[in-house]
Image (tube, helix red, strand yellow):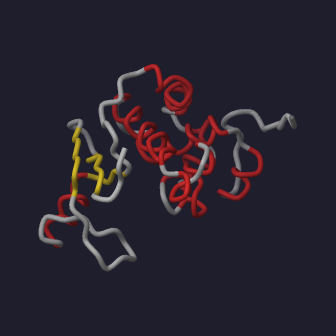
């Protein structure tokens, strides 16, 4: 079995491609959490981590390990992975919290159940309003029924659409 040597957690990188090459799975997850919820309370950071973890149930769609899930499409699934904070995380005050969440979230309560996506609550609500109460993903033509929705009272709404059986 090959042992992979990664750069130290939080090492500055210039791109998602460099992150894929040099950073550990936990480091990548922590960077995604920072980019998506670094300004949110810890419970929302945990929920963001569980969103990525939940996607492991559908490897053909999202990837078979946490690193491939988080970096899928060079950051197209989790846009925060491309942020300046994620590329140079130690410059951000929330980095140590995000790294701790990435290392320990599975020992915390999953408050979002099987949700596979999240968006800012304002964007999520606008999407539903524009699509007759259904959610339409960017670049698609079909709006889907939301079967589960969780708002933790912060910036994001976590959700699951039809067609994903757990």
Depth order, front residue of 155/69: 69
Q: Quadrant of residue 134?
A: bottom left
Give the residue drawn at x 48%, y 59%.
77
Tell me where residue 20 appears, x and y as whole percent. Answer: 70, 51
Q: Quadrant of the N terminus?
A: top right
Q: Nearer the viewer, residue 127 or 116?
A: 116
- Position in image of residue 94 (x %, y %): 48, 32
Q: Quadrant of the C terminus?
A: top left
**Residue furthest top as drawn:** 107
Q: Residue 139: x percent and y percent?
A: 39, 77
**Quarter of the image where one finds residue 163:** bottom left
Nearest the viewer among 85 and 154 is: 154
- Please give the name of the residue rendered at 22% of the width and 56% of the height, measured from the top-left corner: 146
- In the picture as drawn, the residue positioned furthest to the front comes out as 165
Taking the image as shown, residue 102 lies to the left or right of residue 131, namely right
Name which residue lies at 25% across and 71% down: 143
Residue drawn at point x = 48 percent, y = 54 percent: 78
Report x, y in % for residue 35.
49, 47
Residue farthest along the right direction in this orientation: 2
Along the viewing direction, whichever of 10 and 45 lies nearer the viewer: 45
């Amino acid at each position: 079995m090959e042992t992979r040597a990664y750069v130290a957690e939080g090492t500055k990188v210039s791109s998602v491609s460099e992150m894929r090459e040099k950073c550990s799975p936990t480091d990548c997850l922590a960077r995604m959490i920072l980019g998506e919820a670094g300004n949110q309370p810890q419970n929302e950071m945990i929920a963001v981590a569980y969103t990525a973890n939940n996607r492991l149930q559908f490897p053909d769609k999202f990837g078979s390990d946490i690193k491939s899930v988080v970096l899928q499409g060079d950051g197209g699934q989790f846009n925060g992975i491309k942020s300046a904070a994620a590329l140079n995380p130690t410059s951000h005050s929330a980095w140590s919290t995000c790294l701790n969440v990435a290392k320990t979230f599975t020992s915390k309560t999953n408050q979002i159940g099987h949700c596979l996506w999240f968006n800012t609550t304002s964007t999520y609500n606008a999407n539903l309003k524009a699509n007759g109460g259904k959610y339409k993903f960017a670049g698609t033509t079909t709006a889907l029924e939301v079967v589960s929705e969780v708002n933790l009272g912060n910036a994001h709404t976590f959700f699951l659409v039809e067609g994903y059986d757990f």
